[in-house]
Image (cartoon, helix red, strand yellow):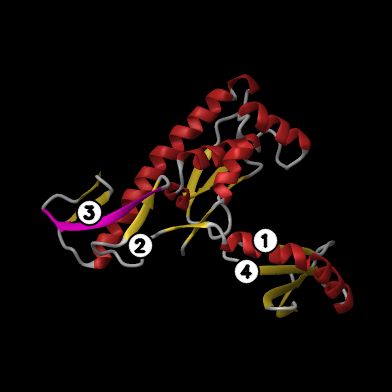
């Protein structure tokens, strides 16, 4: 039987703004509030929670919600191509490049002097997008695997099993790790600086030993990557234009 979930709009009326949220009522023990990377506020409450209780908790958390939204708004925007034509901006490993589309017999993508040169047999936007998307995925497979192997080498004394690596587009998470030892990384990490990619991969690798965020997990993360806090700050300074 499917779990019962009730969805409704919820508006937080602050002094100078209205914050539109989504309220989910479901079978859970505690009320939880999250702000997604796209600044969408989600309130998850138990089915039996009263409206007054939800309002009380939301009111208490409103300063945090506003602070989080402003923090997200102030992040540096990484450009992603809105159109796959020459002159549009894109990013790769934290650096900005200009698309330069050209027709050629051989299909390839080349990084050259601040440009992402895309050579295709036909220069229509859909064809260019397919070539660029494949190039980004190929680079992600290569770069992510490199840092995964590097992280495992750092952890070699801890007898951790080699995880299965999956790469996919995720809207709200940079990475995840399951109890079965599957690490999933957001394909969009390939747009970020390598210090961020390495941090996320090390973070998820540490979950192979501690599948939580306890003090033991963070102690383990520190032992493997002493500058993880600085890397995390760099990661949090970016947001992707989607």
Could you classify mark 2 by the number of other residues whose Cα lies within 10 Å: few (under 14), some (14-19), or many (20 or more)? some
Q: Earlier in the sequence, mark 2 or mark 1?
A: 1
Marks 4 and 3, how far apart in space? 35 Å
The location of residue 41, given as percent across then percent down, is 67, 69
Q: Residue at x 36, y 50 (%)?
A: 136
> Residue under circle 1?
68
The stretch drawn in magenta includes residue 66: no
Marks 2 and 1, how far apart in space? 27 Å
Camera-side residue: 176 or 93? 93
Q: Are marks 3 and 2 in contact (CB under 8 Å)?
A: no
Marks 1 and 3, how far apart in space? 38 Å
Left or right: residue 199 compared with residue 112: right
Residue 118 is labelled as: 3
Q: Earlier in the sequence, mark 1 or mark 4?
A: 4
> Residue under circle 2?
81
> Residue under circle 4?
40
Q: Earlier in the sequence, mark 4 or mark 3?
A: 4
Q: Residue at x 55, y 45 (%)?
A: 234
The location of residue 29, given as percent across then percent down, is 84, 62
Magenta residues span 95-104
Could you tell me how many numbered marks the image carries? 4
């Amino acid at each position: 039987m499917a779990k019962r979930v009730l969805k409704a709009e919820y508006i937080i009326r602050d002094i100078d703004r209205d914050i539109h949220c989504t309220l989910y009522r479901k079978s859970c023990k505690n009320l939880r509030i999250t702000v997604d990377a796209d600044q969408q506020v989600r309130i998850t409450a138990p089915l039996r929670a009263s409206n007054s209780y939800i309002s009380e908790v939301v009111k208490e958390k409103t300063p945090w919600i506003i602070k989080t939204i402003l923090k997200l708004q102030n992040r540096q925007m990484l450009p992603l191509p809105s159109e796959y034509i020459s002159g549009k901006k894109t990013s790769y490993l934290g650096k900005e490049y200009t698309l330069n589309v050209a027709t050629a017999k051989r299909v390839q993508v080349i990084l050259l002097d601040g440009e992402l040169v895309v050579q295709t047999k036909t220069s229509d936007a859909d064809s260019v997008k397919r070539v660029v998307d494949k190039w980004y995925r190929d680079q992600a497979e290569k770069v992510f695997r490199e840092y995964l192997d590097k992280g495992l080498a750092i952890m070699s004394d801890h007898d951790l099993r080699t995880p299965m690596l999956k790469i996919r587009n995720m809207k709200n998470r940079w990475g995840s790790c399951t109890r079965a030892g599957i690490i999933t990384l957001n394909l969009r990490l390939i747009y970020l600086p390598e210090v961020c990619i390495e941090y996320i991969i090390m973070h998820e690798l540490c979950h192979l030993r501690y599948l939580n965020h306890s003090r033991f997990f963070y102690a383990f993360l520190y032992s493997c990557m002493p500058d993880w806090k600085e890397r995390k700050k760099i990661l949090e300074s970016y947001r992707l234009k989607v």
